[in-house]
Image (cartoon, helix red, strand yellow):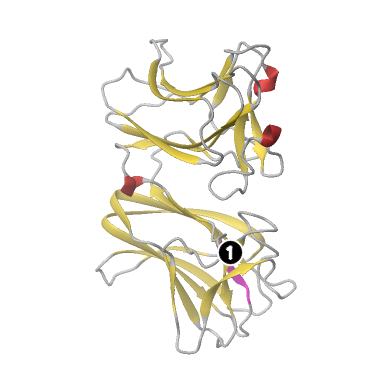
Amino acid sequence: MFEGTRGSTAYLDIALDALSIRRGSCNRVCMMQTCSFDIPNDLCDWTWIPTASGAKWTQKRGSSGKPGVGPDGDFSSPGSGHYMLLDPKNARPGQKAVLLSPVSPSSGCLSFSFHYVLRGQSPGAALHVYASVLGSIRKHTLFSGQPGPNWQAVSVNYTAVGRIQFTVVGVFGKTPEPAVAVDATSIAPCGEGFPQCDFEDNAHPFCDWVQTSGDGGHWAVGHKNGPVHGMGPVGGFPNAGGHYIYLEADKFSQAGQSARLVSRPFCAPGDICVEFAYHMYGLGEGTMLELLLGSPAGSPLIPLWKRLGSQRPYWQNASVTIPSGHQQPMQ
């Protein structure tokens, strides 16, 4: 569970995003690899394979350039971001262009999530996703896209041990057009049913997390267009798109009051890793964010991680390994 505590003023905002709990200890190779393609000329180690005729994937901002075909804009940062578009310039009918993910080590199962658009006027356009172990010539088909007018979310799992690479293949129809696009990719170890939340589901904005408070304050969902007090984040993690949650400190009547955000109970036979992004910046002494370990049975809370006072004016990653041996279930 997370606990946010108000300091001497309400003008130091605490925000959280991208909460994740998974099996195993925390380390660099297990951290989620995300890419929104929003930084020009930065594909986050994704690469595309050129073809002799020039068919390729390209970084695109705004609409596809052809009404009624492809996306009307970016998914992760609408109006300002970029995405990857299957570029029809110099392409031939039925031709393919390949987009390769960065290589990710896997000890069992990897999950690949992304958003895509498949909207064209010419028949035959397609999107396929494959996975393979580096060094092997065999590719496993994971997904084939379905036509639709809007961005569609996809998450597929691939079970293998070794260095894994995902391949996204765009196919032109009978008449090459900008009908296929990809955005907001992430590669991470399979969730295995542990609590996770990016606060993007409007119907269930807190996912399975529950907030508790006896002091009047609470956690609220924020959006990129509403930085709190001018000191909170300008948008969600990692690229200022989407939603996050923040502690409404001005709802507290005095310093030292707090509000908790508690995960659903879960069991873990071994080590587990908690990953999240946090934002703490502003004025006021005593503001504090803590990660605590508890149990529905009411065992004493165990402090795992803490930050006190103003930190830096941008999102920061944190990961905490919880070793085995704690009372089950925990939360």
At x 52%, y 41%, the residue is: 315
Circle 1 — which element? strand
Q: Quadrant of residue 234?
A: top right
Give whichever of 91, 108 is nearer the camera.
Answer: 91
Which secondary structure is most common in the magenta stretch?
Answer: strand
Task: Tell me the kind of residue under disc 1.
Answer: Tyr
At x 65%, y 26%, the residue is: 11
Residue 268 at x, y percent in the picture? 32, 29
Residue 105 in the image: above or below residue 17: below
Residue 142 at x, y percent in the picture? 42, 61
Range of the magenta residues? Answer: 178-182
| Residue matched to label 1 | 83
At x 61%, y 83%, the residue is: 176
Residue 120 at x, y percent in the picture? 66, 74
Left or right: 233 in relation to 136: right
Residue 265 at x, y percent in the picture? 44, 23
